[in-house]
Image: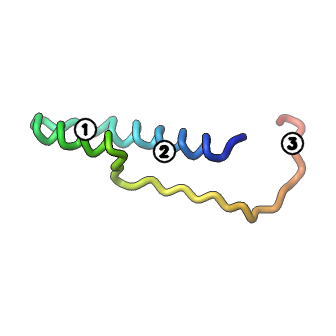
Amino acid sequence: MDVFDVRDRLIEDYREFTSSFVHPRDERIGAHVDRLTASGYQWPAPYLSLNPNFASGARSAGW
């Protein structure tokens, strides 16, 4: 598993989720929101923390 791919997918899923309920009625505001989104701006900002200091354990038989 590539942790960077996981991070990118999580952020993209979050972007899709947060933008799914933003539908401004005013075209100018919609265009502004689209420009911000296209530039990478996201509100609320995604927060993802991966802690590399966890203890490894045995793999489950189902994995």
Report the side of 20 relative to 24 (left or right).
right
Where is mark 1, residue-wise?
34
Viewer-side label of 3, 1: 1
The mark that comes first in sequence, 3 or 2, is 2
Q: Residue at x 57, y 46 (%)?
A: 7
Q: Eyeballing the image, is 33 above or below 45?
A: above
Q: Eyeballing the image, is 46 above or below 16?
A: below
Q: Amino acid at mark 2?
A: Ile
On-image quarter of the N terminus? top right
The mark that comes first in sequence, 1 or 2, is 2
Q: Position of residue 23 (x, y in %)?
A: 22, 36
Q: Position of residue 11 (x, y in %)?
A: 48, 44
Q: Residue at x 54, y 39 (%)?
A: 9
Q: Position of residue 45 (x, y in %)?
A: 39, 55
Disc assigned to residue 60 = 3
Report the side of 43 relative to 2 (left or right).
left
Q: Amino acid at mark 1?
A: Asp
Callout 2 secondary element: helix
